[in-house]
Image: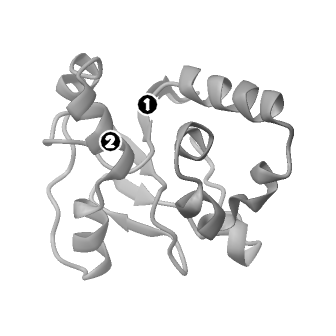
Amino acid sequence: MIQAVNGDPTMHIINGGIWLAHLPADERNRLAALAMALPVALTVISPSGRKIGFVHADVPGDDWDAFIERLDCPQVQEYAMWTRDRVRTAKRNLPLPPIRNVDHVYFGHTPLAESVTAANMSWIDTGCFATGRLTLEEIA
């Protein structure tokens, strides 16, 4: 959405974002500003005390804490927003080492027919914009 407002809207439209083009420019700009203010990654402690990570696409390296410490780096942000390396491996049922210093990490970005879990990672984007199917996970 941010790229659609600030530049080329093609990918956003292809991925279900035509609604944005129908909004007045000031509303598009307001929504883009809200999106830009969101964190790239989020760590929460579950009711049972588990450390849960949320990130759009992927984590560079295999250490959650090191990733969080480097989030001010634009290259780390880009990796977290766009990379699909781990999900490609998980979709092929190849082994993946867990991400250290976190109990579980949830990812989106790559629409899948059904959610995929490998090690301590789950990819839960089931393409709601196209399929109407939204995946929810209970965090215990």
User: Quarter holding the N terminus?
Assistant: top right
Q: Which residue is mark 2?
A: 80
Q: Are marks 2 and 1 in contact (CB under 8 Å)?
A: yes
Of callouts 2 and 1, the N-terminal one: 1
Residue appearing at x 29%, y 22% in the figure: 71
Q: Which residue is mark 1?
A: 40
Question: How far is disc 2 from disc 1 in space, using C-alphas?
Answer: 7 Å
* Residue 43 picture location, percent across and down: 44, 26
Foreground residue among 99 and 35: 35
User: Quarter holding the C terminus?
Assistant: top right
Give left or right: position of 24 versus 63: right
* Residue 49 in sight in this render: no
Residue appearing at x 61%, y 54% in the figure: 137
* Residue 123 picture location, percent across and down: 44, 61
**Quarter where residue 19 is shown:** bottom right
Q: Residues within 10 Å of mark 1 (few under 14, many from 20)?
A: some
Amino acid type of the residue that numbered disc 2 sits on in the rendered structure: Ala
Foreground residue among 38 and 65: 38
Q: Is residue 119 above or below residue 51?
A: below
Residue appearing at x 75%, y 35% in the figure: 28
* Residue 50 picture location, percent across and down: 43, 31
* Residue 94 picture location, percent across and down: 17, 77
Per the image, label 1 sits on a secondary structure element best described as loop
Q: Is residue 132 above or below residue 39?
A: below
**Quarter where residue 31 is shown:** top right
Per the image, label 2 sits on a secondary structure element best described as helix
